[in-house]
Image (cartoon, rainbow, N blue to C red):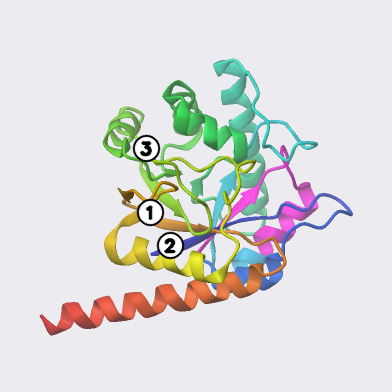
Amino acid sequence: MKLNCDMGEAFGAWPMGLDDQIMPYIDQANVACGFHAADPLTMANTVALAKQHNVTIGAHPAYPDLVGFGRRNMDIAPKELKAIIQYQIGALKGICESQNTQVDYVKPHGALYNTMMADFAVLETVMQAVSELDATLPLMVMAVPEAPQIQKMAKKYGLQVWFEAFSDRLYTDEGRLMPRKEPKAVHGSFDLIEKQVEQLCETGTLTTASGKRLAVHADTICVHGDGEHAVDAVRRIRTLVESLTLNQSSNTSAI
């Protein structure tokens, strides 16, 4: 199981996240592209840090919403949304090429991500944007019950999709993230986070807010690099995932 994290979300003189401490523990860095956070220098520094730690680089495009950190919905026409997404991916591609590395996937951010998972017309626009720019880039989306429908849509555009689950977010019965404004939407303890990751890795399920067990096929788990205890949380998740992987390998070898 891979671990991915949103990175490079500082802006100018305003720091955000603990990228230098988190990067050694993750596999995939979702690098902000300037529309919800980041600036050219922050992007360049984040790419260099990811390269230093052999972490795969993904473009993390968002709605043009610096003030709201990309978490506010925007009603944007499909043609304009495609251009917005392609502009951001293209910017990160250029910075990566200057450092002899590359963008390997795309994961939309915040409100754009949540909207495309609730409205598949928006998801299709995102797929069009990626496929027109570079159809070799996988699109990271939420692992939801409609996964077969999403795979069918992606195939239409010649795209691969990677499904992700979240280590520290509460889920609704519909398989979506509980809105952050709701109580307990974000797990506040290491025990809850580790329990969710362990359940994901061992059984391919999550427990929703109502106690329902939801089947989830995930290729990667999203961890978060901000917050008071972020480094400890990510370090513990990495240790847990490696331990579970080792146990599964041992059990397979014994059969």
Question: In this rendering, is residue 120 above or below 30?
Answer: above
Which residue has dot 3 on it?
159
**Residue type indicated by callout 1:** Thr
Query: Disc 3 to disc 2, how far (Cα)?
Result: 29 Å
Q: Residue furthest left?
A: 255
Q: Residue furthest front?
A: 210
Q: Nearer the viewer, mark 1 or mark 3?
A: 1
**Mark 1 Cα shell of 10 Å, populated few (<14), some (14-19), many (≥20):** some
**Residue type indicated by callout 3:** Leu
Whether residue 54 is visible: no
C-beta proximity under 8 Å, tags 2 and 1: yes
Relative image position of residue 172 (x, y in whole percent) = 44, 42
Q: Quadrant of residue 221?
A: bottom left
**Residue type indicated by callout 2:** Gln
**Label placed on residue 207:** 1
Which residue has dot 2 on it?
196
Q: Look at the numbered disc 3 and give the secondary structure of its residue.
A: loop
